[in-house]
Image (cartoon, helix red, strand yellow):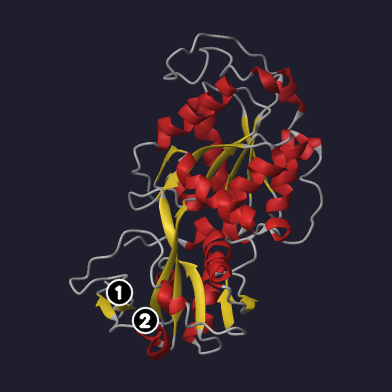
């Protein structure tokens, strides 16, 4: 069972929040004037193994020597993410044979989207719905997805403090190292403790949700915390009272504290509150799944050439593709990527369909 870290999904939870100032002026985003004097040497790169030329950095001629800018949204502490993210810039620059790379941290996701729209941001890291928004609104091209626990996908979990209503079978306990066992029902875990394959589960239980029921969602921009579970209810014709918690942890807490009877989050966000609520797995029972959902990932600007996007893809893979990143590795420290893999277009198609099903509300 995956245990998705909360930091990685804060990105997906800040999409579509209120309008913000533009992604920043040219000086903020592109860095100092010295970068304008950067010259580039060209070199052959036929097999993609070397990210660029020997002397002047990678063959990213579209930027006319300006730095390549990675746009991020802070998950928790902006000062901390900037410090850690500089390590990503350093690694990518090294993998691109010294081509300059800088970090731009926006107040929220719209700032990063605007940066890519204006040409000031060339690479952004985002949740799956954000990747689709970048594609549709800024001409971005998904190039990579995060790997966590050996997988490039995850699921929404529906949970409740009222298993008598929403569990159609006896909950199954799964032992935890540092907390009381976590409970699951409706076939998500079999009697031997084996988890089902990622996908929709417990849909018959979802049909028991009555119109007007209050649901603790995460955020209007969250893939797992809103888009995917709300799509399930839309298909069932169920209209609920959506309450947005503002985070996966808080959504779990809303149900744990009895404020709301059912809620959603990524799987398994109960881990994030076991220090303050070691019995959360007993009090909050997972009764349904939605998905599978592609992991968050990396989008490159459509203004770059196909060859340049491949250079950037190969560069990230060169230092993160083995899937063994951990504490101390910048990609892990910022968004807890254990590795990266080429974007799975089939999986992203699912996110596209879910995003587009929201129409003007998306």
Q: Secondary structure at mark 2?
A: loop
> Is residue 155 shown to the viewer in this render?
yes
Relative depth, front residue between 94 and 311: 311
The image shows residue 208 at horizontal and vertical percentages of: 47, 83
341 to 80, vertically: above or below: above
* Residue furthest out toward the left: 192
* Cβ–Cβ under 8 Å for marks 2 and 1: yes
Residue at 77% of width from left, 26% of height from top?
A: 33
| Distance between mark 2 and mark 1 Cα atoms | 8 Å
Residue at 50% across, 52% down: 335
Residue 2 drawn above or below residue 265: above
Res 205 → quadrant: bottom left
Left or right, 10 with respect to 199, comes to: right
Upstream in the sequence, badge 2 or badge 1? 1
The x and y percentages for residue 28 are: 76, 40
Quadrant of residue 216 within the rendered picture? bottom right
Depth order, front residue of 204/296? 204
Which residue is pictured at 52% across the width and 17% down the height? 52
Q: 180 or 360, which lies in front?
A: 360
Residue wearing tag 2: 278
Q: How many residues crowd mark 2 within 10 Å: few (<14), some (14–19), many (20+)?
A: some
Residue 72 vertical placement versus 252 (above, below): above
Give left or right: position of 322 versus 162.
left
Residue assigned mark 1: 178
């Amino acid at each position: 069972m995956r245990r998705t870290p909360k930091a990685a999904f804060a990105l997906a939870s800040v999409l579509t929040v209120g309008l913000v100032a533009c992604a920043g002026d040219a000086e903020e985003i592109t860095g100092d004037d010295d970068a304008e004097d950067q010259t580039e040497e060209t070199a052959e790169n036929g097999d993609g193994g070397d990210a660029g030329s020997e002397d002047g950095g990678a063959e990213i001629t579209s930027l006319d020597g300006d730095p390549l800018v990675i746009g991020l949204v802070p998950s928790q502490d902006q000062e901390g993410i900037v410090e850690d993210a500089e390590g990503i810039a350093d690694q990518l620059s090294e993998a691109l044979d010294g081509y300059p790379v800088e970090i731009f941290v926006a107040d929220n996701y719209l700032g990063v989207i605007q940066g890519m729209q204006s040409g000031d941001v060339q690479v952004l890291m985002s949740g799956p719905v954000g990747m689709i928004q970048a594609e549709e609104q800024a001409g971005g091209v998904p190039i990579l997805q995060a790997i966590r626990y050996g997988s490039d996908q995850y699921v929404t979990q529906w949970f409740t403090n009222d298993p008598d209503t929403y569990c159609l079978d006896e909950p199954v306990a799964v032992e935890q190292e540092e907390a009381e066992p976590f409970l699951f029902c409706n076939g998500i875990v079999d009697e031997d403790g084996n988890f089902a394959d990622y996908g929709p589960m417990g849909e018959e239980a979802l049909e028991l949700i009555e119109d007007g029921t209050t649901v603790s969602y995460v955020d209007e921009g969250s893939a797992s915390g809103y888009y995917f579970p709300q799509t399930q209810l839309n298909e069932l014709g169920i209209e609920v009272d959506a309450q947005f918690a503002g985070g996966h942890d808080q959504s779990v807490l809303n149900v744990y504290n009895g404020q709301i009877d059912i809620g959603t989050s990524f799987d398994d966000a109960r881990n994030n509150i076991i220090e303050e609520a070691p019995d959360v797995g007993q009090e909050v029972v997972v009764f349904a799944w939605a998905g599978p959902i592609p992991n968050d990932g990396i989008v490159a600007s459509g203004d770059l050439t196909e060859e340049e996007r491949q250079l950037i893809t190969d560069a990230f893979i060169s230092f993160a593709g083995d899937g063994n990143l951990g504490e101390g590795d910048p990609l892990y420290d910022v968004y807890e990527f254990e590795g990266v893999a080429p974007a799975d277009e089939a999986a992203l198609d699912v996110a596209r369909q879910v995003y587009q099903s929201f129409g003007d509300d998306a």
